[in-house]
Image (cartoon, rainbow, N blue to C red):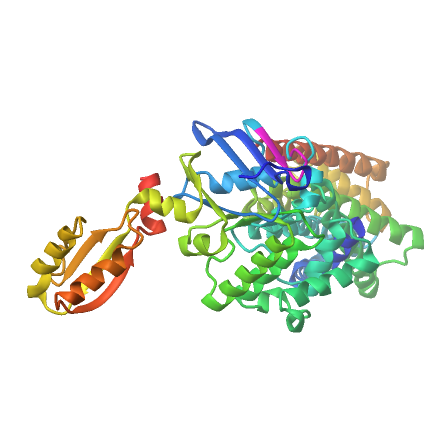
Amino acid sequence: MFRALLLRTTRTILRVPALVAGPLLMSAFFLLIYTGQLGKAGGGMLPEGTYLEFILPLVLLTTAFNGGAVAGQLLVRDMTSGYHDRLLLTGAGRTRLIGAPLIIGGGVLALQGVILVAVSLLLGLRDLSPAEAIWLVVGTTAAGVTFALLGVAAAIWSRTDAAVSATVFIFFPLSFLTSAFAPRDELSGWLEPVATINPLTYVLEGLREVSGGVAPAGALLAGAVAVGAVATVGLAACAMAFHRAEAAR
Amino acid sequence: MAALTPSSAPQITVSRLTKKYADAWALDGLDLEVGPGEIVGLLGPNGAGKTTALEILCALRRPTSGSVEVAGADPTRDPSAVRARVGTVLQTTALDGVATARESLTLQARLRGVPARRARAEAEAALDRAGLAEMADKRIATLSGGQRRRVDLATAVIGHPRVLILDEPTTGLDPTSRRVLWEQVREFSGEGVAVLLSTQDLHEAEQLAHRLVVLRSGRVVANATATALKSAAGDRNLVIGLVDATDRTAALRTAERLAQSAVPDRDDDRTVRIPLGATGGLPGHYLAALATEGIAVADVRIDEPSLDDAVIGLTA
């Protein structure tokens, strides 16, 4: 039964390529622009490594929440058309119906991560070991699935595409209130304390430790903890949304 | 009604069902039964509680109070069992537009627990039965409204449910598609499936349903056949159209001689109306008497209250 749902979600994504191609193309575009615009100037302020190694995690992070929103969008698509209720009537269960887009969404994110790492290598990223390349992809996927939980919670709660899009709208600016373009100790005035309390900073720096960019010691562990914390919030939000949906029946 | 045997026990039993939303009672003590092979039409104005009742029966909503049993299971306690035994067509056609008809039906079969190797065969059989075999590999978004509704019904009957719940299944369909769908519903009823059909189309209700249940403000105000509802709404009238308006006075006197009351039609000075009541032989005798007196008759018909009149009278 769950395999049939996974197959259905995969088929939907393949037949609506805009769901996947849009975020991927946008990420690749920004990767090119950041390195082209800021490569020389940005590289000059780094004690070590290239600007590409420094900026790649930001591109992977934005890919994570744009791509992570796909699971929520697929759910909203079904909810607003009434198809979600039709599937509920089969006895498939809400958990399976939500799990399928989350899992396939994660798989798509992993693929997007692989493509972006490959593009980075073509742009001159240092040679990564297989383990480092895998860690970058796993980190992107984990971050994306975590954000997807919030998108899914928004979908169940509101049954509107606007609410799901709002989760991207919230995280996108948050991703810039981090050490996005410069190491944390180079940030000026109010931005450094804001970046310090922003959990996305630690996700970014965790990815940066793997990509070879400048990152504080223990950044990978701190990033994993940050992803875990956001995932806990996401799971709690999903549970509350589930409960509300059941109570409204 | 004949005593129910275990094999003819109702497939839907609803007793004192209530449902409250905020301050409003959508259902306020609904009682209902549908037997195997029976088609029961659920009628009532917008807001009468029809869709709420159907959603409770197919375990999409929970009642506030009351008891419900559908295909031997309680939708509140055992929603999975109900969903496995009940096929539902919701008010709006709800299908996956990017899937083909075959893929959509195969998925439905899988989600109802049909093993993978049989699911495709069941889907194809359902498409054949719905007359959609040629559309099997077309994406649902490219099908017409009528074809999509037929896919919707085919989806509902995958897995051979014991109960069919149909919420305005023919809304928006052209007359041909509507007839095709009616035939399918009659076939399922003939196979012993209990059908509960909500509709605003009283002609459809009269054509399909063995019995009609009329709701008003969440309560049943009538539970009878269409014929019984119409009879209760008023008398049938024999309506005689005369060739010559000057013959009307003579026609009225002839009716009085036969000990029947007759009234002139208010809108037409050539027409006479006679309430029929239980006068089985009156039409023939009266027409013979008019012929004897040389009163020429242009047309004859029997008027009876329509189902519209009956339902409006009950729900006003």
Tell me the magenta residue range.
B67-74
Q: Residue at x 10, y 55 (%)?
A: B253
Question: Is B69 included in the stretch rendered in magenta?
Answer: yes
User: Which sits in the foreground, B60 or A53?
Assistant: B60
Whether residue B244 appears in this view of the structure is: yes
Residue A216 in the image: above or below residue A31: above
Question: Is A189 included in the stretch rendered in magenta?
Answer: no
B275 on left or right of B115: left
Residue B60 in the image: above or below residue A62: above
Tag count in the figure? 0
Q: x, y percentage for residue B261?
A: 17, 48
Q: x, y percentage for residue B234?
A: 29, 45
Q: Residue at x 70, y 36 (%)?
A: A234
User: Which sits in the foreground, B42 or B187?
Assistant: B187
Picture quarter with the C terminus of chain B: top left
Q: Residue furthest front?
A: B292
Q: Residue at x 82, y 38 (%)?
A: A224
Asked which quadrant contains residue A248, the reply is top right
Q: Residue furthest bottom?
A: B134
A94 on left or right of B66: right
User: Which sits in the foreground, B231 or A69?
Assistant: B231
Whether residue A55 appears in this view of the structure is: no
Q: x, y percentage for residue B118?
A: 81, 59
User: Which sits in the foreground, B289 or A189?
Assistant: B289
Q: x, y percentage for residue B38?
A: 57, 47
